[in-house]
Amino acid sequence: MGNRSRVLVIALGIFFVGIAALAKFYAYPTLAVAPADQVAHTVSAGPNATFFSAKELAKKENQTLEAKRTVRGDVTAAEEISKKLNRKVVVFDTAVVTADRPNYTFPDDPSNTDDAPLSFVQERVVLDAHTGEAVRWDDPDTGEYISTTLAKSDRLTLKDGGSDLFRGHEGLVLKFPFGTEKKEYKFWDTTTRKAFPIQYKGEDKLYGLKVYKFEQVIPKQKLVQAKQLELPGKLVGEPAQAAVPVDRTYQNTRTLWIEPVTGAIIKGEEKQLAALEINDEPRLTATEVTIAYNDATVKKNVEGAKEDGVEEGGYKAKAGQLHLIGFWVPLISLIIGLLLLGLVAFRQVWQPATATRARSEEESD
């Protein structure tokens, strides 16, 4: 191998090793962040549900519940908070509307409580852009909050340290870390406003996409109430009393199917049971339902689709691209680079040895 060829091969070897390092330690960390401008919609359906209708003051059975979630990123707030914290964060405003009829929309008149949904929760969360972990942020203008109405005045914030009703988000909230591992995490539960362990249960496939299955069991517990709920005594087995204070209890088994490269939630299912109790004795079922992402939502999350002109989901392709940058490009580039450098080293050792043998043969002749 001539000197020019040797220099060229060494340069190519160093180039490919550099590509491997660049892809692994720069390109991948740059790409493995939650997009600050993300918009996502999910629809969950719960057939054969039982719930207590506050409007009708009656128990309703064999109903179908529909829960719609909207997630929308706040880019300006994310940039501002990232600078102040000196770390990359994303900010998402979320809203979940649960109703007993499909395609529910809020009434134009907010005072029309008869047409209110069964439940409504609005939240602002600040998350680490890489891990999906909640980040505490109590700024009065951009800080996290939770509310069960559309009125800003009803938002529970972390002002003065928060309250028993809300002490800030914790654990994973809307996604899992990039490179999700087969281990236990903590995941946020909006109803109790606490994070509980969620355990890895195995691998599965959804529309051909490999996913990790996690399960979270939230044991039965009393929910904190801003004002204790009172019901007519006849509804809860106390006909002699006009109104009776009741406790609300809740338990849930949540199952999440996670795409491990991106940490995206591809499918979610919850088996909820909420009851109204007096002195720890259940008197009325508030909600009993198994509710899960519908097929259209799961397929959108895997294959991608446009909603309101915006591309959503498509995590099969996104995971493939990220895996290519984070694993295959560094691996193949490193192998090529080391082979080229190894070839030069081998030729350096082999050529002098060959020349020495040739000289020895000439001298012996």
Image (cartoon, rainbow, N blue to C red):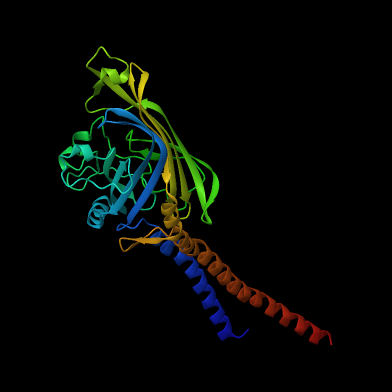
Q: Residue furthest top?
A: 240
Residue 260 is situated, as x and y percent measured from the top left of the image, at: 48, 52
Say which quadrant the C terminus sits in: bottom right
46 lies above or below 294 = above
Give the side of residue 364 with respect to residue 272, left or right.
Answer: right
113 lies above or below 278 = below
* Residue 244 picture quarter: top left
Residue 121 is situated, as x and y percent measured from the top left of the image, at: 27, 41
Q: Is residue 157 visible?
A: no
Q: Residue furthest right?
A: 365
Give the side of residue 51 with respect to residue 124, left or right.
Answer: right
Give the side of residue 35 with respect to residue 352, left or right.
Answer: left
> Between 279 and 165, which is closer to the camera in this rendering?
279
136 lies above or below 315 = above
* Residue 303 picture quarter: bottom left
> Between 115 and 85, which is closer to the camera in this rendering?
115
Residue 15 is situated, as x and y percent measured from the top left of the image, at: 49, 74
* Residue at 26% from the left image edge and 29% from the top image edge: 164
**Total marks placed:** 0
Give the side of residue 143 with respect to residue 362, left or right.
Answer: left
* Residue at 52% from the left image edge and 45% from the top image edge: 182
Q: Is residue 266 visible?
A: yes
* Residue at 15% from the left image edge and 39% from the top image edge: 111
Say which quadrant the N terminus sits in: bottom right
> Between 250 and 170, which is closer to the camera in this rendering?
250
Residue 289 is situated, as x and y percent measured from the top left of the image, at: 41, 35
